[in-house]
Amino acid sequence: MDELPVSAWIAETIEPGTDELSRLLADARRRLRDRGVATESVPWRALLDGSLPALVDQGRIDEARRALDVFLAPHLNGPDPAP
């Protein structure tokens, strides 16, 4: 089964008029691009299947930002250096 693009997932899953999730994801993509990380390399589906959408739907935006930061950290910081 083919995975939906992020935009299609949002359109099918999130209530109409909810744009906070889109803003959070756009900011995350910008942060990745600013660090030279290809946004296609990030497992967005795992993020969207997790708690982030529910946090946004419940208005818990600060928690959603923290969850997004935790999710992005390995991609923004790169692999741990060898010991």
Image: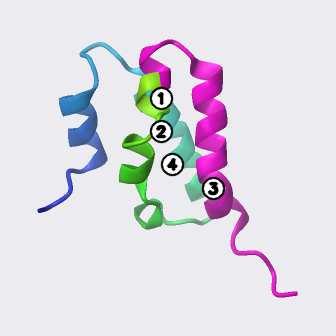
In the rendered image, which quarter contains the C terminus?
bottom right
The answer to whether 67 is drawn above or below residue 59 in the figure is below
Identify which amino acid the numbered label 4 is placed on.
Arg
Q: Which residues are magenta?
A: 55-83
Residue 26's tag is 2
Residue 34's tag is 3
Q: Residue at x 42, y 17 (%)?
A: 57
Q: Residue at x 62, y 31 (%)?
A: 65
Q: Are marks 2 and 1 in contact (CB under 8 Å)?
A: yes
Badge 1 is on which residue?
23
Measure how far apart labels 2 and 1 are at the Cα level: 5 Å
Q: Badge 1: few (under 14), some or many (20 or more) residues near its Cα, within 10 Å? A: few
Type of secondary structure dominating the magenta stretch: helix
Q: Nearer the viewer, mark 3 or mark 1?
A: 1
Q: Nearer the viewer, mark 3 or mark 2?
A: 2
Q: Residue at x 61, y 52 (%)?
A: 72
Earlier residue among tags 4 and 1: 1
Measure how far apart labels 3 and 2 are at the Cα level: 12 Å
Foreground residue among 16 and 54: 54
Q: Are marks 2 and 4 in contact (CB under 8 Å)?
A: yes
User: Element type at marker 3?
Assistant: helix
